[in-house]
Image (cartoon, rainbow, N blue to C red):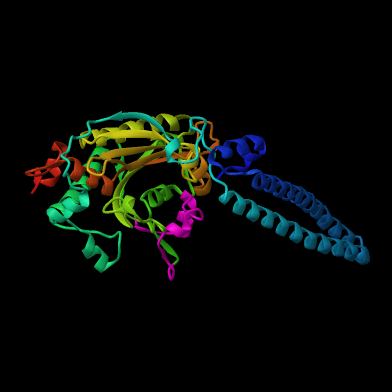
Amino acid sequence: MLTLAAIKENPEEIIRKLTKKHFDAREAITKVLDLDKVRRSSQAELDANLSELKGLAAQIGKLMKEGKPSEAEAVKQKVADMKEANKKLEDAMTSAESEITEILLSVPNTPCDMVPEGRTAEDNLVERTGGKVPDLPADALPHWELARKYDIIDFELGVKITGAGFPVYKGKGARLQRALIGFFLDNAREAGYLEVEPPYVVNAASGYGTGQLPDKEGQMYHCNEDDLYLIPTAEVPVTNLYRDVILDESQLPIRNTAYSACFRREAGSYGKDVRGLNRLHQFDKVEIVQIQHPDRSYQSLTEMVNYVQTLVEKLELPWRILRLCGGDMSFTSAITFDFEVFSAAQKRWLEVSSVSNFESYQANRLKCRFRGTDKKIRLAHTLNGSALALPRIVAALLENNQTPEGIRIPKALVPYTGFDMID
């Protein structure tokens, strides 16, 4: 969440920046500043009272020694009254602090200056493109037809077992999934990321720490009895490894990668754009996460974007990178770059990765800090990216590489699949 210090320093700048996300923050920011005045005045009065109470305690002892019990009792009554007043001041402070936190949890992160204006995906900027779009014949099949033809993904069987959005991968389809996971993890490790294996369920504190709660509560699967949530991305448990942690500056940057299944309700999703693998409720993904020094987080963001580019290039897929406009960005992000690959049979671009810098927004929720060489403790910056999400990668691989003989496997994946053709 936004820091109170940043809001107090320049509230109008915060309000102005949030208009780029089409969020009117004036009422919330004004309320936060008013509550902070209550908190600070209560604290000042409480501090003064506590100082006076020390003097009164000494005064009581002195009066008793002087044989003036009635005067001592009068002072004791004053002490009792002040203690009652102090409790009210403490309650006022606690209430103000709680309300400030509640308001700030509902305010999104401010976009950085590089974020373009805009409301929808149509307003995103294409940063760069690469790869060659295959020239498929007119009768080329979409991936859901290819999956049926080669018996590698069974969507109907998944519906029987669970429901729509939970496919069953079979034979070479299952091996392709496993191959991609291994390929992405090995590449991440070679790029300097430490592999971790996180839990697939998290508590509410973890959801609040990375900003999924309360913003996306309706999109997460909730285990009511245990008050746990199925993760929508490995970003949540991996970033929360550093919740309530004070790192040493020499430890930065921290680079982690993790494979996980991901679970998203995707309420309201329907139609042709979500057919087949285009949008699932359960899918596999390899995530990369960085905890970085604020002075170097944008350098890390560039490195992460360039790294994801190498993955789609190795998979021989046509790709493009989008810089998201303010209206299309997530609640927690300061800036996001999306990767899309071209699905030749569907003739459309499919998002396969988002790489984001959250600056100190998540770190403030997490209380993820570091101690600098000057011994001062500061909030770190957090970054994450999909590297990569599997379903739409698989969709594009199947469609773009279909031939009369079968589906060709990109050379970089063959050592992982153990086969070079699905036939």
Residue at the limit of the structure toward the bottom, as seen here: 225
Using the rendered image of the protein, determine whether residue 292 is visible from the camera's viewpoint: no
The stretch of residues the image draws in magenta is 199-226
Q: Is residue 205 magenta?
A: yes
- Percent across and percent down for residue 293 are 46, 34
Left or right: residue 416 versus residue 270 is left
Q: Nearer the viewer, residue 22 or 191?
A: 22
| In the depicted structure, whether residue 386 falls above or below residue 298 | below
Q: Nearer the viewer, residue 375 or 106?
A: 106
- Percent across and percent down for residue 50 are 77, 53
Residue drawn at 19 percent across, 44 percent down: 399
Q: Nearer the viewer, residue 184 or 275?
A: 275
- Percent across and percent down for residue 37 are 73, 46
Q: Quarter of the image holding residue 192?
A: top left
- Percent across and percent down for residue 275 are 29, 53
Residue at the limit of the structure toward the left, as seen here: 405
Left or right: residue 423 versus residue 100 is left
Total number of numbered discs in the rendering: 0
| In the depicted structure, whether residue 189 falls above or below residue 66 | above
Q: Quarter of the image holding residue 74?
A: bottom right
Using the rendered image of the protein, determine whether residue 108 is visible from the camera's viewpoint: yes
Q: Is residue 416 magenta?
A: no
Residue at the limit of the structure toward the front, as seen here: 138
Left or right: residue 295 versus residue 402 is right
